[in-house]
Image (cartoon, grey):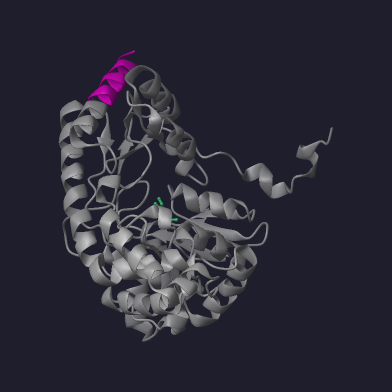
């Protein structure tokens, strides 16, 4: 029998199953409260709007030809055009040639890594960082360096780029302050370090004033996206529907031209039908959907904060996110988040994610990520109570 293990490329040794993807298999169990994965609540999916858009597109013989045909690798031109306008609306004007449509922003992260990283190359990431980005980068066998918040300690680096979450980061729920963003851009300019900005949650601010993205601040400094070093990734997944798998990259045009070659080699193009549906829905009602999502998740954030206040033992601390989907818990030193997550699942029937997996290096094991996006408020309250019980028992003895 073939020894498959001997044949796999070295990169495969770094590719392991994600705890989060594994936990998605538990979603079918009604006895478990899900505070683990960062899934949007299906109650928000604009099902009727999507059905109407689909019927409209396929009901038109000319539109249907385009919708069912291979799309251009760059993306459906009207969607690229719309996104250029959308980016301007969030303070980052660009042209359609600065946009590549991808199969979700996860694909954009993979493509960016494929473009820049050879084995052993450096990449700077925050500790902790979005696990999906780390898994995408791992396949290109990089060396990780820590990207400090705001990069004020950053004097030198050989990294090819830094990967940054700016708003309501996955996994911590925290955001980079405006001053930290400016400091990061200063460091990026001084070190000639490109920054990959993950804009996944930018539209999901519940309170406080919007902070311009790194891309917007960079464009304000340089006058144009083409003159800067920021590569921005965006997605419709959290506000419209993740299954359509439509995300985008906004970047200097030479970078987009290279990413298009990678797209051609990777999957030729993103589904034209899905792009057309998203354009139809987003053009008519992105702002309405975003406002609905903000009100909905704000209530869930508030209710989870109240449940944590009421149920966590005094030795546990947590972040207070101003948006997004996530809360980050720090447990007493010496406690292993992995063991706590296992015990919470087995004894408390509550699914949470151990924080260690989000670290590219030097994991802080006494951490957990909770998400307030999916569980209804009463279920989440019950889940936090159960987690509190498990933690009190663990800490107490
Ligand atoms: C920070 C961040 N970036 C990117 C993604 C990928 O999303 P998608 O591929 O659906 O656009 C996610 C999904 O959870 C995320 O949390």
Q: Nearer the viewer, residue 80 or 315?
A: 80
336 lies left or right of 116: left
Q: Most extreme residue toward the top, as rendered?
A: 397
Name the spot of residue 127 as percent of width and height, x first.
Answer: 44, 49
Which quadrant of the view contains residue 277? Answer: bottom left
Residue occupying the far right of the picture: 1
Q: Main secondary structure of the magenta part?
A: helix
Q: Nearer the viewer, residue 233 or 236?
A: 236
Q: Is residue 131 left or right of residue 160?
A: left
Q: Is residue 394 magenta?
A: yes
Q: Is residue 229 visible?
A: no
- Looking at the figure, which quarter contains the N terminus? top right
Q: Residue at x 20, y 44 (%)?
A: 301
- Please give left or right for residue 109 compared with residue 280 in the image: right
Q: Residue shown at 22%/58% (left/top)? A: 205
**Is 209 within the magenta?**
no
Quadrant position of ligand 1: bottom left
Question: Which residue is nearer to you in this view: 342 or 361?
Answer: 342
- Residue 393 makes an appearance in the image: yes
Which stretch appears magenta? 385-397
Residue 248 position, x and y percent, is 44, 67
Percent coordinates x, y for residue 132 in the rendering: 48, 50
Image point (34%, 13%), residue name: 397
């Amino acid at each position: 029998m073939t020894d498959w293990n001997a044949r796999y490329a070295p990169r495969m040794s770094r590719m392991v199953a994600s705890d989060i993807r594994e936990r998605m298999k538990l979603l079918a169990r009604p006895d478990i409260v899900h505070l683990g994965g960062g899934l949007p609540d299906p109650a928000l999916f604009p099902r009727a709007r999507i059905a109407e858009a689909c019927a409209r597109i396929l009901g038109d013989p000319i539109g249907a030809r385009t919708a069912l045909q291979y799309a251009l690798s760059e993306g459906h031109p009207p969607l690229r055009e719309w996104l250029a306008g959308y980016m301007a609306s969030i303070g980052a004007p660009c042209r359609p040639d600065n946009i590549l449509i991808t199969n979700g922003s996860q694909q954009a992260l993979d493509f960016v890594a494929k473009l820049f990283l050879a084995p052993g190359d450096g990449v700077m990431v925050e500790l902790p960082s979005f696990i999906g980005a780390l898994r995408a980068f791992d396949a290109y066998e990089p060396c990780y360096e820590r990207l400090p918040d705001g990069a004020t300690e950053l004097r030198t680096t050989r990294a090819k780029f830094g990967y940054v979450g700016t708003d309501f980061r996955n996994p911590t729920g925290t955001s980079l302050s405006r001053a930290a963003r400016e400091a990061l851009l200063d460091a990026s300019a001084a070190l000639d370090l490109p920054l990959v900005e993950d804009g996944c949650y930018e539209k999901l601010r519940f309170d406080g004033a919007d902070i311009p993205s790194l891309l917007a601040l960079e464009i304000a400094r340089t006058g144009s996206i083409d003159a800067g070093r920021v590569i921005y990734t965006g997605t419709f997944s959290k506000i419209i529907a993740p299954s359509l798998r439509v995300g985008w990259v906004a970047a200097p045009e030479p970078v987009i031209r290279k990413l298009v070659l990678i797209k051609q080699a990777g999957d030729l193009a993103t589904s034209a039908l899905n792009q057309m549906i998203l354009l139809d829905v987003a053009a008519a009602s992105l702002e309405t959907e975003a406002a609905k999502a903000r009100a909905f998740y704000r209530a869930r954030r508030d209710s989870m904060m109240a449940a944590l206040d009421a149920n966590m033992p005094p030795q546990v601390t947590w972040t207070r996110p101003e948006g997004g989907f996530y809360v980050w818990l720090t447990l007493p030193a010496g406690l292993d988040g992995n063991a706590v997550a296992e015990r919470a699942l087995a004894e408390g029937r509550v699914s949470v994610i151990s924080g260690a997996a989000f670290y590219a290096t030097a994991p802080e094991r006494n951490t957990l990520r909770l998400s307030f996006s999916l569980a209804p408020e009463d279920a989440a309250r019950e889940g936090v109570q159960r987690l509190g019980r498990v933690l009190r028992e663990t800490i107490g003895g």
